[in-house]
Image (cartoon, grey):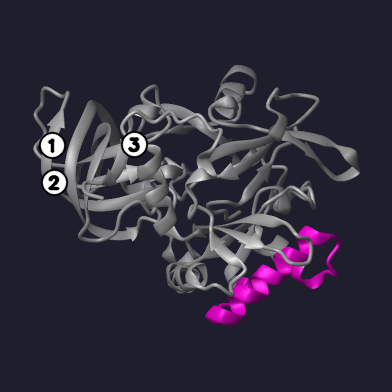
């Protein structure tokens, strides 16, 4: 069985997991838990409700709900991460009942007659993008409620996967032009400041204005003005690696040791992995302050498991970062990195351009 980021795993309990990234132990897959059937989990959050096939009800997990749910009620859905020396949310290969792949689901939707207005809008956006870029439908997939068949035609978003670095480059080039064109039905989701209206902002060192500026230039978040339905539909293009771009780094990783908190000013020297999960930035350290008595002098990488900081910076840009300082030991090297991830100091983490 071969799975990658954004592929879905369904267990015998009906819990739906999403494969997370590309660094997995041999016995299973590191995952996010996304949805659970209503007989084992119910959420008080109104937007969490999902109606599946045969009127089966699911609820989506938000923030750390899924992490707490697994640890408290279904701890068997964890895998042991040897370098970290701890269990993290995941599914062992012998626990997998079913898998769902974004690219296969999209191909089915493309071949079918549109069943509703969202299905029709999906085909229209796909045609618009492929005809403008020369990309093929095989370069895309769908995730979220579209993948699992419990989307709402009037309220759900269009969640695409785009496979491969060259394909992502072409797509972003096209979206950059489309967002600026008066005639394009695709617009940048973050072009208007009121997109955050009514939402509580929790990051301590990262302002809403800074967030909006960074999100706009990522280009993978848009809205589609659908003339047929009259809806403005959110459209997302999630970057996922092609199979030939994936390397097995787990087998060469020996140990990851957390050393404390770090604040740094760094220059990005390589952004080739910045679009994926986790987002990895190779950096040159300009200034470093740590809580660690070992007095680490420089960091080699910034690694972000936080979606807010994916595609956050590009080559030769200078960024300010705060996060967890880690020592990484591999078969061939020892280096330090700052990691942004789900942790008690989640909202104190940041990565942003030093000058906007």
Q: Tell me, yes or no, if residue 75 can be seen here.
A: no
Farthest-out residue, top: 72
Residue topped by disc 2: 285
Q: Earlier in the sequence, mark 1 or mark 3?
A: 3
Choose top left, top right, bottom left or bottom right for residue 39: top right
Q: Is residue 164 left or right of residue 302?
A: right
The answer to whether marks 2 and 1 mark residues whose Cβ atoms lie closer than 8 Å is yes
Contact flag, marks 2 and 3 (Cβ < 8 Å): no
Question: Element type at marker 1?
Answer: strand
Q: Identify the residue under disc 3.
A: 206
Q: Residue at x 66, y 63 (%)?
A: 225
Q: Secondary structure at mark 2?
A: strand
Q: Magenta segment, which residues?
A: 110-138
Tell me residue 111's x, y (percent): 79, 72
> How far separated are the C-alphas under marks 2 and 3?
21 Å
Q: Is residue 228 left or right of residue 163?
A: right
Q: Is residue 270 visible?
A: yes
Along the viewing direction, whichever of 316 and 272 lies nearer the viewer: 316
Residue position marked by numbered label 1 in the rendering: 288
**Residue 48: x and y, percent?**
70, 33
Nearer the observer: mark 2 or 3; the answer is: 3
């Amino acid at each position: 069985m071969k799975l990658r980021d954004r592929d879905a795993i369904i267990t015998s309990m009906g819990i739906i997991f999403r494969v997370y990234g590309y660094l997995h132990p041999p016995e299973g897959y590191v995952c996010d838990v996304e949805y659970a059937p209503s007989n084992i989990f119910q959420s008080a959050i109104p937007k969490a409700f999902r109606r599946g096939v045969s009127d089966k009800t699911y609820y989506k997990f938000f923030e750390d709900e899924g992490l707490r749910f697994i640890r408290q009620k279904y701890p068997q859905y964890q895998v042991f991460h040897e370098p970290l020396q701890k269990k993290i949310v995941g599914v062992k290969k012998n626990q997998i009942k079913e898998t769902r792949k974004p690219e296969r689901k999209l191909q089915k939707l493309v071949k079918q007659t549109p069943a509703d207005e969202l299905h029709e809008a999906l085909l229209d956006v796909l045609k618009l993008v492929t005809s403008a870029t020369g990309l093929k439908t095989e370069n895309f997939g769908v995730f979220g409620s579209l993948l699992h068949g419990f989307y709402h035609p009037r309220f759900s978003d269009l969640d695409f996967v785009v496979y491969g670095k060259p394909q992502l480059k072409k797509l972003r080039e096209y979206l950059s032009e489309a967002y600026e064109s008066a005639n394009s039905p695709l617009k940048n989701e973050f072009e208007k400041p009121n997109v955050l209206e009514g939402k509580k902002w929790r990051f301590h060192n990262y302002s809403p204005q800074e967030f909006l500026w960074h999100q706009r230039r990522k280009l993978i978040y848009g809205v589609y003005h659908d003339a047929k339905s009259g809806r403005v539909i959110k459209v997302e293009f999630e970057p996922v690696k092609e199979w030939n771009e994936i390397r097995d780094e787990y087998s060469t990783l020996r140990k990851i040791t957390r050393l404390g908190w770090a604040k740094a000013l760094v220059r990005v020297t390589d952004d080739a992995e910045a679009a994926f999960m986790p987002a990895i930035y190779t950096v040159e350290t300009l200034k470093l302050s740590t809580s660690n008595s070992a007095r680490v002098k420089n960091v080699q990488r910034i690694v972000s498991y936080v979606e807010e900081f994916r595609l956050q910076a590009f080559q030769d840009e200078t960024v300010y970062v705060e996060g967890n300082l880690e020592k990484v030991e591999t078969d061939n090297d020892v280096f330090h990195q700052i990691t942004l991830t789900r942790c008690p100091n989640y909202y104190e983490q940041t990565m942003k351009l030093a000058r906007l």
